[in-house]
Amino acid sequence: MKSSACKASILLIFLLLGTFSTASAQYYYTISQNNLSIRVTLPGAGYVTPGPGYYYYGSTIIAQAYTNPGYVFDGWYLNGVYQGKLSSIPITMTQDYVLTAAFSVRTVCLTITNNPGQGGTTAPMAGIWNYTYGSIVTISEQPAPGCTFSGWYLDGEYQGLGTSITVPMTQDRQLGAFFAGNISISEPSGSPETPAPPPVSGLPAPSLAFYCTSSTTVSGFRVQLQGVLAYDQIGLTGAGISFSYSANGGSTWHDLAYLLTDDDGAFSAVWMPSASGNYIVKGIWTGDEVYSGVGTTVNFAVTPMEIVDKTNEDSNIFSVSSNSTLSELAFNSAKEEISFTVSGESGTAGFVQTCIPKSLISDVENLKVYLDGQEISYSIISEGDVWIVTIGYHHSTHKVSMELNGDTSQGFLSSLTTVDLIVIVAVVVLLVVAIVGIIVFKQRKHSNRK
């Protein structure tokens, strides 16, 4: 009898365990995965992270393209559909995907300028020339009658007086041939203005932003142009941007450089204007199958300062880069004050970036900036031997002035507001009352003892 009861109990336990296992199985699901295949069109041209593999359904992968020297990234293809030239691309794994990164051999650009244009010629002649990455190019010079050749500048660095120069094309480069002599300087004829590409209906428009900063002295005068082409803060890689400039308010335009963006959408170039003055610099990207073209114009002004650097007997210069129209750029050496006027269409935002030699500012904390006579805040960054000061405003017509070494003898009091002064006065009164009270209390206590 006991044996039968024991067997029945064991059978019941197994039945219960089986029921529990069956119930548990009803809540177990297999997590599905999808395959991501990675392909590169040109072996050795670049690579993609993360690598191929299986990823959980619904997860989002951020693929990033990296380009090796000598090649350019041409864009993404997802299951055969072109996705554009953004440096990274998000993929939500709802199915198997084949992601292709397209690369090609890079074409690099040599921009040749003659300064001034009437002083002589070069072979190849002035202009923008395309070469395969790694090519070796030889350029020769020929002065005009009555002129002499005064030197080559490659990417802003002096290279000497040779009748020719050999340039290795391992990047986009700018070569300037400088001439001297009895030359009547005038603005040479140039091409008509190239209009910015109109937005393409239905295509998103990226942003093209750039600015110019100058060197600090006249003898080493050169301009660094740098910026970024991006969409939704992600750089467009391998995009070719054409830059041109005008020295006469936009009547004529001249090639400055043709640049390909890096993996992060950034670009830079060295520009050597033949003289100080007011310039308009324009950058144009024509767009592609995914993104609309875009164009941006920056006004750039540079002028010598009436202060001589005694260490090298050279005059200092400063420059202003802005999306506003610039005028009346001047430097008052007695007051150590920069001033200029900005103007633009009402209802739009304006900015100014001023490039000031560090040698002219004894203490950056003393710099003061005024807009229409009212002191305003600014941002400042250090870049090489210059300070870059940036301000923003709403467009109309404004007078901007910058005191390089403002008077700080009364800086503490002048920085106090009315409320601050009232609080200080109240605290002083309370302290006086407290001190008087303590004195009276001690006198009374002394009298009571007598």
Image (cartoon, rainbow, N blue to C red):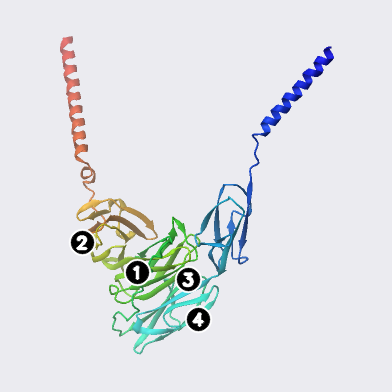
Closer to the chain start, of discs 1 and 4, is: 4
Q: Label 3: how many residues lie within 10 Å, few (<14), some (14-19) or many (20+)? A: many
Residue at disc 2, secondary structure: loop
For marks 2 and 1, give the CA distance: 32 Å
Closer to the chain start, of discs 2 and 1, is: 1
Residue annotated with mark 1: 281
Q: Please state which of the two labelled residues, at mark 3 or mark 4, is closer to the viewer.
A: 3
Residue 404, percent from left and from top = 27, 57
Residue 386, percent from left and from top = 35, 60
Q: Which residue is nearer to you in this view: 220 or 353?
A: 353
The disc placed on residue 138 is: 4
The amino acid marked with disc number 2 is Ala
The amino acid marked with disc number 3 is Asp
The amino acid marked with disc number 1 is Val
Residue at disc 1, secondary structure: strand
Closer to the chain start, of discs 2 and 4, is: 4
Residue annotated with mark 3: 172
The amino acid marked with disc number 4 is Thr
Residue drawn at (60%, 47%) of the image: 57
